[in-house]
Image (tube, rainbow, N blue to C red):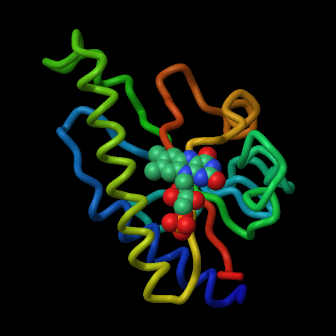
Amino acid sequence: MLKRLTRTLGAALLAASLLMPTAGEYVIDVYAIMADGIYLYEPRDHKLVLINDGDHRELASKKPGFPRTAPLNLVYVAYTGDMKKSPHASDATKQARYLGVAAGTMAQSVALVLEAEGLGGCVRGSVDGEQFRLAAELNDDQEIILAQTIGAIK
Ligand SMILES: Cc1cc2nc3c(=O)[nH]c(=O)nc-3n(C[C@H](O)[C@H](O)[C@H](O)COP(=O)(O)O)c2cc1C
């Protein structure tokens, strides 16, 4: 399971970042919450960078349940700093829609990799945002958009 998950994680993160649609105004970063730490995916080097070690899986959801025991949760986090300078800056609804489209497309790319590997995934809006922000060291220009729990199909 661990080997399959590791292989899947690499392919999934690559797919998510390569296929990320962008209107040139934002970047969606992908954080991985695993039993040994919270990592940030660096697409340029195809590397996971440790942000905070230890098991923080309880932050993957607001309520107890499968996200807290799953081996992997991805959290899609938008960097919105550049959006403030964009031509759409005055249209917050449109900007929010664009971020949803981008993160949703990334999660769908990951879902296709999961399907090919025989693993399961669940897109979720419920993340313990406040605590995750602290643990992942997010700044004011970063906004949590979506989470995705990944694991074996039971
Ligand atoms: C934007 C979005 C947010 C969601 N948030 C949650 C969530 O927080 N928790 C949850 O259990 N399911 C959430 N879901 C639903 C699951 O992703 C999934 O669609 C649902 O569990 C049905 O899965 P199934 O089609 O495999 O039965 C969300 C779905 C979407 C599209």
Residue occupying the point 76% across, 48% down:
52
Residue 45's quadrant in the figure?
A: bottom left
Quadrant of the frame with the N terminus? bottom right
In the rendered image, residue 2, in percent from the top left (x then y), is placed at: 72, 85
**One can see residue 147 in this view:** no
Residue occupying the point 27% across, 36% down:
98
- Is residue 144 found left or right of 154 in the rendered image? left
- Is residue 72 found left or right of 48 in the rendered image? right
Q: Is residue 89 above or below residue 20?
A: above
Residue occupying the point 62% across, 81% down:
6
- Is residue 74 found left or right of 97 in the rendered image? right
Residue occupying the point 50% across, 29% down:
142
**One can see residue 74 in this view:** yes
Quadrant of the frame with the C terminus? bottom right
Residue 129's quadrant in the figure?
A: top right
Residue 11's quadrant in the figure?
A: bottom left
Quick one: which residue is furthest to the left in this view?
87
In the rendered image, residue 62, in percent from the top left (x then y), is placed at: 75, 39
Q: How many marks?
A: 0
Q: Quick check: which quadrant has ligand 1?
A: bottom right
In the rendered image, residue 63, in percent from the top left (x then y), is placed at: 79, 43
* Most foreground residue, 132 or 123: 123
* Most foreground residue, 3 or 148: 148
In the rendered image, residue 57, in percent from the top left (x then y), is placed at: 79, 54
Q: Is residue 94 above or below residue 100?
A: above
